[in-house]
Image: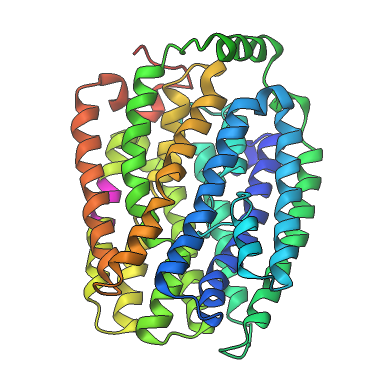
Amino acid sequence: MAQHLSRDTRLLVAGQAIRGFGYGFTAIVLGDLLAARGVRPVQAGVFLAAVIAGSALASLVVGAFGDRFGRRRSYGLFFVGIAAAGTVVAINPPLWLLFMVAITGTLSTDVVDNGADTTLEQVMLAREDAGTARVYGWYNAAGAAFGAIGALGATTVRVAPSNAHSHAWLFIVLAPVGLVGAIIASRLSPAVEAPPEESHRVTRRHRQSEPGPSRHVVRNLTALFSVDAAGGGLVTAGFLSYYMVERYGATLSSLGWLFFAVSALQAVSVLLAPLLARRVGLVATMVGTHLPSNVLLAAMAFAPSFRVAAVLLLCRATLSQMDVPTRQALVMTVTTPPERTRAAAVTNAARYSVRPIAPLIGGALQLLGLGVPLLVAGIVKSGYDVTLWHWAQRLPSLRWRASNDEGSAPTN
């Protein structure tokens, strides 16, 4: 299946992979860095909120101007930003400067990000495959697999528990990641850009505030995705690493091995998701795998030891990301080509717009108990799954099976 991917698609998958490696490493180190600097739970929540808010803002900017500024140019510029952010964090700057870096949207609280680069990749990949989750399966598998390698790299690091500077220096890994990503962006062909006629239509619609034909479905999906993201914002990889250090005394090495295994399982699961979607449909795949994973998430709040919590997290990893390629394929399927960049930006930004609030709430919830955010997240995300399923049953176009369509947007 991989041999049928075009050159541009392979480059985009490579961009996701190299970024996944960097974020797989730093998302784990981030929680450890905050703990090493003596950051309290509420402060940690505020910082993680800033990282997420930056991702949302960057995604919205790309959605508004990416097609006109140039997708390749925007893509490369963001990778340069990643390199710059990693360099600044590596010098262990004051906390206020860390916050300034956080709001640029170039850091990530998770192994695989959902910011501006993801928005651009999602719409550029739609050129080859908007109708099935096949390409998005390979794309997300690459991010998860290299995120696993990055997490594994964290297991080789040996730093003093109280040495915040040693933790910060590890972020220098983002410098080569950003530079390699910028080179990848420069090698993309003009075919990934928005066709001139589409770009003109998007510009005209933007000026006239004219909604696209798929606006109603996109609006509803955006609202639903926001609920899911709100729950997910309570339990980012940064939070999980912080939580396991604080509650169980987990070491950076053990966290590295754990998140390596999590990402490896996710890489396999997102490859299987398109196969399942072709049999049962996109929405059925999303809900059928996501709901049980959220039950496992809630159960982690009651884990008596690091070992039990790790087992529950690994079980969850086999299911939790199967909705990602199917969700991305769904957004591209229910929209017309001129709407896709904006739709991808809006749905991704919506997920990130609500997430800054979640870490703040999570920090407050930890005052009741360190594991309370896990329980609340599981309940909220399960509610999203049930609501999505019932809503989709009223729209035949959303019960579409991936094998029956090659990318045309259904009638709304």
Q: Position of residue 344 (x, y in %)?
A: 51, 31
Q: Position of residue 263 (x, y in %)?
A: 49, 63
Residue at position x 71%, y 62% in the image: 86
Is 102 one of the magenta-colored residues?
no
Residue at position x 33%, y 46% in the image: 228
Q: Position of residue 317 (x, y in %)?
A: 38, 61
> Which is nearer the eye, 108 or 195?
108
Rendered-image quadrant of the N terminus? top right
Q: Position of residue 322 (x, y in %)?
A: 39, 48
**Residue 279 picture quarter:** top left
Provide the major secondary structure of the magenta segment.
Answer: helix
59 horizontally vs 212: left or right: right
Asked if 242 appears above or below 158 in the picture, the reply is above
327 horizontally vs 393: left or right: right
Asked if 254 appears above or below 226 in the picture, the reply is below
Rendered-image quadrant of the C terminus? top left
Residue at position x 39%, y 78% in the image: 244
Colouring method of the image: rainbow
Q: What are the residue bounds of the magenta stretch?
A: 288-293
